[in-house]
Every structure is written in structure tokens, then in C-alpha cells.
Image (cartoon, rainbow, N blue to C red):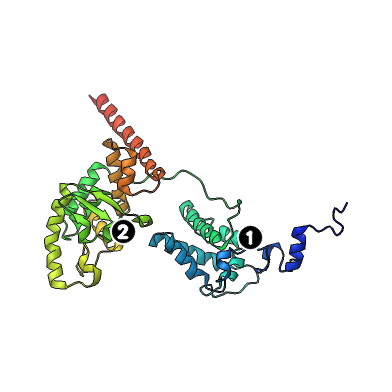
Amino acid sequence: MVPFGDGMGPMDSERQRSGWSPNGPHGRLATPFDSNFTGTGQILPSRLVRIQHLPWISLWETQLRAEKKSEHTIRSYLSSARRFALTLLPGEGEMDIEEMAISEMHNRCDPNNGRLDLFVQSISNLRPATINARIAAIGHLFKFLGHRIPDWVQRPGGTRPLPRTLTRDEIERVRDSAANSENPLAEPIITLLLDTGMRVSELCSLDMNNLDLGDKSARIYGGKGNKDRLVLYTQKTVDSMNAWFGSRRMQIETKNPTGDDVDAVFISTRSSRVAPRYIQKMMDSIADSAKIPRSRLTPHTLRHNFATGLLERGVDLVSIQRLLGHSNIQTTRIYLDISDQTLREIYHRAQNAAIEE
């Protein structure tokens, strides 16, 4: 039975006017942009219609920066989006995706044209964390363009691995190696990281006016997520920083660093602001001296040690969250599992000692 004479409802009439054909190149999998039915019925957002001829990548990057995404996140998102855009369907040739217009990228991101399927298959052998990061990037791009990631795209599950920490003995060996290092930066950087749980990017961006040695505090500006926060430290850090400032003053006077390097707390022998790679190379040297595998000594490992140390001394989770600069307390809760692990180790050591007695 045909309900309305020609058997066409409002949506069918609209499809016919837009040139939609179930079998042709403008079918459900590739509906023309200027119709009301693109992809899964999602049209280009009205905010993008008047600028649809502009390059997609620069506008999307502007959006990411407006959302105060970190530089690391922006680089990761752009890299994943480029990989997706370069995923070719059968019969397609290579294209210049950098100058591709928003309207064309909108069509390219149609969740039903098969490109997303090929992209998901291409990353299926990567680590779960990498897969999740790339899907998150593509999800943001799709939302920006007026699409959404279909429900069939599932992020890999599994339990999050516990952060790696050093034992107390290893920490002492690291401190001793840093104190005896020929690099004058070794001791103040190791001490500051263990005292504050600072991220390596935050440490590299520290300026002299961010420090208040009298108050034993430092102000972090533009941390992860572009958030500002206060970090605290002990007299150990004050003493090691004062010792470093003598060497720093000599470098400033002899090397005359330029630009914002002159304001940096930590300056390399080349009189430039230290970078994360420089710090990791320094830590590799300390690890060798401390007889610790290089893979186990990183700035983030010391951040984990800072957090677990606070928890073991009875500091509440909310305070630890603020000191670490976590935006979500669920990120901080993982340290509860480490604390349980530490508790088991303490218990078994005590039990073994009792048996030996």
C-alpha cells in the first residue's frame, strides 16, 4: 500500500531536489555538500558556511588554540587529522590536504564513505593509548565540521597501567648522583622535580620572577590545559637553587643570552633555556651513574614519586590533585592503586622480618 500517492515523504522530496541518488556518486555515502544531506544527514554548521572556501587546517588549529589546548595536544591532533585526511579510498589520487577547503574536508570526513573505516583499521595495531589519542583527535575534527564519530568506532578498553615509581633506595642513589654530577643543573633540577612534582614542560618554562624563595613557592603560568597554579617546595630546593644561581649568574655575564632566555631559571651551557630533551639526556647520565635503567628515570617518574610520597604521608587526594595540576580527580585516583601496592610491599617485608626473627 502506497500511503501518499507517489510514495514520497518530505525527506524523499528534499533528497530528489538536492540531486540525491541511492546508487549514484551523490548517494548516502557521498551526498553533495550544498544539499541538506551530507553524510549521515549532518550539514555543514552555519558558523562555517560563509567561510567554507577557506583552508580547514588553519581554522581548526585556531579553534584548538581558542579552547586553550596545550601545544603538545595541538601537534598531536594536527598529526592525527593529517593522517586521516591522507587516507585514500579506492580510485582516489593524492591531494594537497593543507589547502583543502572546509567544504571539501567536510565531505572527506563523511563517516559513511569508508575513509573512517580504513583509518581505524590502519591504527588497529598501535598501543591502546595511541589509538585513543588518534580517535579523540578525529572526534574533535568531526565535531568541528558538523559530523560525529559513529557508535561502531570503539576505543580500546583495558585497565590503565600504574605509573612507574622509583624505590627509596633508587631515589637516594639518584640524589647522590645528581649531587656529584659535573653538570651544575643536575642537583637543582632533580631536587625541584622531587620537591614539586612539576611537569618537565613547566620546569623548562620557569622564569626567575616565577620563584619566591622566601615563600618557598613558584607560580606556574600556562601549564597543561593553559592553567596557572602554585607549587610549593622545601628548604632543600631553596639551598640547591641558591647554589645554582651562582653558576647561572656567571653564564649570564659571560654568554649574554638573548630574548626570553635571559629570564629563564635554568640555562644550559649554551646560555639558552633548557628543553625537555636536554633534561632527559641529563637524566640518562644520572641513571647510568646511579646504576638504574635509563627507561626508569624520567621527569615524569619523579612526578609520580612526588605524588605517591604525599599519599603515603596522609595527604588527601584533593590536595594532591591541586598540587599536581590535574583537571580531573580521576587522574589523581590512580595513585591510590600505587599506594595499595606499596602497602602490600611494606606488609610482606614486615612479615618476612618477623619470620626470620
Residue 64 as seen in the image, left or right of residue 311: right
Q: Nearer the viewer, mark 1 or mark 2?
A: 1
Above/below status of 259 relative to 290: below
With 124 as the anchor, is 279 left or right in this view? left
Residue under the image location 39 percent in, 59 percent down: 70
| Residue 253 placement (x, y as % from top left) | 12, 70
* Front residue of this view, candidates 346 and 99: 99
Q: Nearer the viewer, residue 156 or 357?
A: 156
Decide which of tag 1 and tag 2 comes sooner along the chain. 1
- What count of labels does the image hold? 2
Residue 76 in which image quadrant: bottom left
Question: Which residue position is annotated with label 1?
Answer: 42
Image x and y of residue 334, in percent: 39, 42
Inspect this view and state whether residue 122 appears: no
Tell me which amino acid carries mark 1.
Answer: Gln
**What residue is pinned by disc 2?**
201
Q: Estimate how packed mark 2 is, as few (under 14), some (14 to 19) or many (20 or more) residues with alpha carbons within 10 Å.
A: some
Q: Report the quarter where the C terminus lies.
A: top left
- In the picture, measured across the screen, residue 222 lies left or right of residue 243, that is right
> Tag 2, which secondary structure?
helix
Residue at left offset 67%, top offset 66% = 30
Q: Quadrant of residue 267?
A: bottom left
- Residue 320's spot in the image, x, y percent? 31, 43
Residue type (three-letter) at the residue carrying disc 2: Ser
| Residue under the point 58% across and 55% down | 149
